[in-house]
Amino acid sequence: MISSGFAEVGNRTLEQKLVEVARRYDIRVVGPNCLGIYDAYTGMDTLFLPETRFLSDGREVIATPRPKPGSILLLTQSGAFGAAALDYMAGHWMGIRAFVSYGNRCDVTEDEFLAHFANDKKTNVILLYVEGLAKGRDFLNTARETVKKKPIVALKSGKTEAGTRAAASHTAALAGTDQVYDGAFKQAGIIRVRNVEELFDFGRALAQQPPGYTKNVAVLTNAGGPGIIAADSLEESGLKVIKFPERILEKFSDFKSKKLLLPVLSGFNPLDLTAEATSDMFKLALSTILEDPDFGGIVVIMQHHAPTILDDAVEMMAKTLPQYKKPVTLCDMGATEMAETMRSAFEKRGIPAYSVPERAARALWSLIYYGTYLREHRVHER
């Protein structure tokens, strides 16, 4: 039911009548006051917004794209947020399993969607935009079971007094005390994000990379400054950029003696391969760190500005990472053609790539947050 004019404007009697009529005929209702449903695999598309629009000069442009088929499920209480999210996902090479805008959720509620998609083989990660929960206890119980099978990333708005007022008038949501939501999400293993950017950053990482099971991480870079920024962000998030153990340092020394790594390599973490690093050097250092049991994941900063880095680095990473089953996120800073081309190529091969170090660091945190939650609750490792 796409139409508005129900509980979100105080017309609860009409909304209840809608539910009563639907139940009389054994019909379930999604909505009202929503954008609709899109299934990327079956082609079901109830969205009332067309994919293209015409500008005043007569040009036809993509306005509300439907992302390519993928493994990310997007559940949103807000239809307008959902339309923007579809646009964002399509523009960032993110594949979608399905999209559900459920608005006032007069009948079908969040916990029912979670229960359904928890067992859906095409879904790898669930993204949730929520202003308030209809049945909090049912939702958390279902979420706790769903998280054992696939991660849930939630953006909860209505944190401030102004936001709470807006939520009530927008989708008739009772936003509730934010600290209560925060604690409940942590208990259920839901990864709560701080902003919209993190919702999609974490979603991309969790859809593409395995979880990490230890908080000890490394930074591998060919650019000193961005490597330090990544290290700061990792530690501020609660991860540990530890010193390399002696066994790794001995391997690095051996590689330097054989001229496989540059003699100026420091051996510190972050590991700066310098601007002269080649794809082969990245592969050697990456493999050495990933195969060590002390490390749960790596942020790789591979700046294309270095003259020795070409697009062969993409294939090197794509062939190396699956051997180790540990999470890796990547950063290539920049906004011009080669930066966009490199990040796009990494994404298409299952390696989440970001434009600034902090985003890559936070994405790695989400992978390790999820993995350590599974381990602490003795859930079978994925």
Image: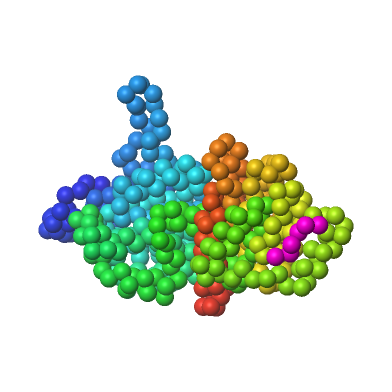
Judged left or right of residue 273, residue 10 is: left
What coloring was used for the rendering? rainbow
Q: Position of residue 353 (x, y in %)?
A: 57, 50
For residue 20, which quarter of the picture?
bottom left
Farthest right residue in view: 258
Quadrant (top left/top right/bottom left/bottom right) for the C terminus = bottom right
Residues drawn in magenta:
263-268
Between residue 264 and residue 149, name the one nearer to us.
Answer: 264
Between residue 16 and residue 292, name the one nearer to us.
Answer: 292
Judged left or right of residue 50, residue 317 is: right
Residue at 31% in and 49% down: 79
Residue at 44% in and 53% down: 197
Q: Position of residue 220 (x, y in %)?
A: 67, 58
Q: Position of residue 94 (x, y in %)?
A: 50, 47
For residue 196, which quarter of the picture?
bottom left
Asked if the stretch drawn in magenta spans residue 16, the answer is: no
Judged left or right of residue 15, residue 269 is: right
12 up-or-down from 57: above or below: below
Residue at 87% in and 57% down: 258
221 up-or-down from 367: above or below: above
The number of discs equals 0
Principal secondary structure, stretch drawn in magenta: loop
Note whether residue 123 is visible: no
54 up-or-down from 163: above or below: above
Q: Position of residue 149 (x, y in %)?
A: 50, 67
Farthest top residue in view: 57
Note whether residue 60 is visible: yes
Between residue 174 and residue 379, name the one nearer to us.
Answer: 174
Between residue 185 and residue 23, name the one nearer to us.
Answer: 185
Residue at 65% in and 42% down: 305
Judged left or right of residue 338, residue 261 is: right
